[in-house]
Amino acid sequence: MKIIIEPKKITHKNFKKFGELISTIKTKPININNGYAKRFNNLCKINTSIKKGSTIMSIFSAKKRKFPMTIKMMEKHPLGSQAFIPMNETTFLVFVSPKGKKPNVKKIESFIVPKQMGVNYKPGIWHFPLISKKNMNFLVIDRKGKGNNLVIHNFKKEKIILKNG
């Protein structure tokens, strides 16, 4: 079975079932530091406490992907959310499928994440690892702790192609 996925523009509404869009748009800031900075509070719900996990912050150094690209696997983190925030102004892609024992190929979606935004996957959401359009770093907030928080599904019969967004 051959499946071609065309990425679409991400919105808070169309990404809600997979997680949250991290953005300062439509968020009222709090003036801090005598007016020299603005604080945008509570932009997403980091969930890492399942099975007494703790929250960690890392930097992932991602390599630029080439398109169209073949998607051979997806992964999920059942014990915690996972947030990706680009450290440079750029767009990137996400490739997701709802929670389940394995990715539902009929419900796979891909989104274009615009500049100055990030994403936070809910625990258990199937996704493909970082799909960066250039060599760059991402700030990643996720879970550390006991338990199996990485499940990988390799596609065997399906040939899934992701187009460039």
Image (cartoon, rainbow, N blue to C red):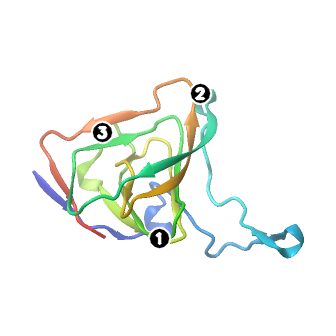
Q: Is residue 41 left or right of residue 85?
A: right
Question: What numbered label is drawn on residue 82?
Answer: none
**Residue that carries the numbered disc 2 in the rendered image:** 51
Mark earlier in primary sequence (2, 3): 2
Mark earlier in primary sequence (1, 3): 1
The amino acid on which the numbered mark 3 sits, given as a three-letter code, is Lys
Residue 123: image location, x then y, percent: 50, 42
Alpha carbon of mark 1 to alpha carbon of mark 3: how far?
A: 25 Å
In the image, is residue 55 above or below residue 22?
above
Q: Is residue 160 left or right of residue 17?
A: left
Residue nearest the observer in this picture, 36 or 21:
36
Residue nearest the observer in this picture, 31 or 138:
138
Residue 56: image location, x then y, percent: 61, 40
Question: What numbered label is drawn on residue 11?
Answer: 1
Q: Is residue 30 left or right of residue 91?
A: right
Alpha carbon of mark 2 to alpha carbon of mark 3: how far?
A: 22 Å
Name the element at disc 3. Answer: loop
The amino acid on which the numbered mark 1 sits, given as a three-letter code, is Thr
Name the element at disc 1. Answer: loop
